[in-house]
Image (tube, grey):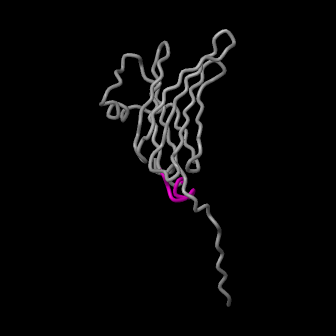
Amino acid sequence: MALLLVSYQTNAEPVFAVKADIYKLKNEITIDSKIAKKLKSLAPIHQPVLLALLNESALIEIGDEKQLTALEVKANEDGSFFNAAMKLKDKTDGQWQSITSFMPNIPNGQTVYFSRTFIDSVWLIKLTGTRYESEELGLASFQNQ
């Protein structure tokens, strides 16, 4: 009787996992230092996640043909910190107008918040970026949300 060992190769290259929880809030909710506590009682309207190689940009876009919110995240080459930019794009008279908000040197694993105000609501984006030693570990982190 022979024992057959099957091995499979996984991507052992470190990756950066990006998680975004997007909340639609009423305009009267104040965004302050206690916002994390307020969000525990609310459900996000979107929860995009993605993996990126270290030192490579990752992009999440939310919106439609008139308004677009883009989140761009790029970890440094060792994954010890990341930069995040939120780009707001609105189509006016057939032309795209954009505003960018940039947060540099966010420590690995830290959560930051971006917000975008609409006429009747505020979108609050809770963004976290975390370095993992492999694609497998990064994907597993999405399952543990």
Residue extending furthest toward the bottom: 1
Residue extending furthest toward the left: 34
| Residue drawn 64% across the image and 79% down it | 5
72 shown above or below 88: below
**Percent of width and height locating residue 42:** 40, 31
In the picture, measured across the screen, residue 96 lies left or right of residue 48, that is: right
Q: How many marks?
A: 0
Q: What is the span of residues highlighted in magenta in the rendered image?
A: 131-139
77 drawn magenta: no
Residue extending furthest toward the top: 93
17 shown above or below 26: below
For the residue pair 59 and 21, the one nearer the viewer reads as 59
| Residue drawn 42% across the image and 41% down it | 106
| Residue drawn 55% across the image and 50% down it | 54
135 drawn magenta: yes
> Which quadrant, please, contains the N terminus?
bottom right
**Percent of width and height locating residue 117:** 47, 18
3 shown above or below 76: below
136 shown above or below 115: below
**Percent of width and height locating residue 39:** 37, 32
**Percent of width and height locating residue 140:** 52, 55
Q: Quadrant of residue 13?
A: bottom right
